[in-house]
Image: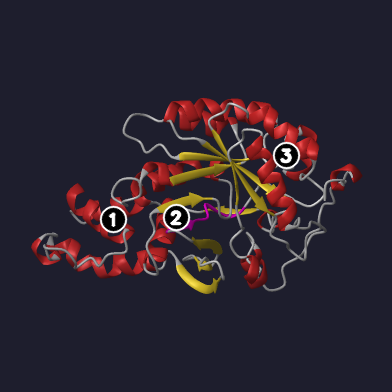
Amino acid sequence: MRIEDIRQRMQALGAKPIHIQRVLRLWSQALPQEGGKRRPEDFLPLEVRDAMPALLADIDKLARIRSEHPGEDGSARLLVELADGQTVESVLLPRDGLCVSSQVGCAVGCVFCMTGKEGLLRQVGSAEIVAQVALARTRRKVSKVVFMGMGEPSHNMDNVLEAMDLLGTIGNIGHKNLVFSTVGDPRAFDRLQSLEVGRVRPALALSLHTTKADLRAQLLPRAPRMTPEELVERAEVYARQTDYPIQYQWTLIDGVNDNEEEIEGIVRLLKGKYALMNMIPYNTVDELDFKRPSWERAAEIARTLHRRGILTKLRQSAGQDVEGGCGQLRARDLSGANQSRPVRIVRREASNAAD
């Protein structure tokens, strides 16, 4: 379901834009529809009031918690059931953040991600995206929403931008606290850079993972064939346009992209750029042929980059202690799912020299 579907349904009942905005605002902020100084019976037309129970029941079905998995770091991974029975994952993050999913499955096929193993099943509608936020807000405060859950947001641009527009206005989320995460797609850069005046312009996170084009093609087999240099160049234009630094994402995988050659590549690409490098040690998954580097090695890499002039944050992947890496909860929930053989990346012996 899209937000526009809710608007049209209310319009058909005679609701005016001010009525629709009120309903959407209260819903997106997880506030009661009967709350506030004005009661619904003093505000909404009779036909709309009579139809509200059925409408709210349908909205409530958009996202429900199937299971919750609290982490020791204050995070909590949520397996969220959509109205059609499909599931996605949301993550309550420390410091009032929330990670939401934009697709059921994903077409990019990152070989280190459980979500990528099943491919793309369907898009998540804009109302279903906002419903994940509303659902999270029934449990704790949410002041930042990152589109880093299941799916590739650039493959679902209309729904993602529609959801961001609502969240960045009546949803009470600051624009720079809405983070559009992508593996990099020319169409996404074009669309974001050409957003018309009045549209919410999110911050941008770019999944880089390596500075080598050939390795990136192995790790992200169905991502657009843009070189790391091209990705950084396009991202830098958006950073200067919005005055938001680009948040580069680097999943640190033992023996794959944790070597000195990659460190030199990062310095070469990002030196002088309006950028923040987020180093995230890999969330180990038994079914996949990758391992998490030691925290000491990860910290050493972060310190080296800092000394070389690259603003770097070493982040803990939420869900380590509950085996809740992206797609793991959904994969465990699906009974009888076929498990394809993991893709093996050739590792360079030299990459372990500094361990």
Residue at the disc numbered 1: 24
Kind of residue sitting beneath label 1? Leu
Magenta part of the chain: 96-105
What distance separates the C-alpha of mark 3 from that of mark 1? Answer: 41 Å
Which mark lies nearer to you, 3 or 1?
A: 3
Q: Which residue is mark 2?
A: 129
Q: Residues within 10 Å of mark 1 (few under 14, many from 20)?
A: many
What residue did someone put label 3 on? 210
What residue appears at the point 53 percent right and 55 percent down from the top-left corner?
101
**Residue 350: x percent and y percent?**
89, 42
Q: Label 2, label 3: how many angstroms apart (C-alpha)?
A: 29 Å
| Residue 259 numbered mark, or none | none
Mark sitting earlier along the chain (3/1): 1
Q: What type is the residue that disc 2 sits on?
A: Ile
Residue at x 46% of width, y 28% of height: 193
Viewer-nearest of discs 2 and 3: 3
Name the residue located 30 percent from the left edge and 61 percent from the top edge: 27
Q: Residues within 10 Å of mark 2 (few under 14, many from 20)?
A: many
In this picture, residue 150 sits left or right of residue 126: right
Residue reaching furthest to the right: 349
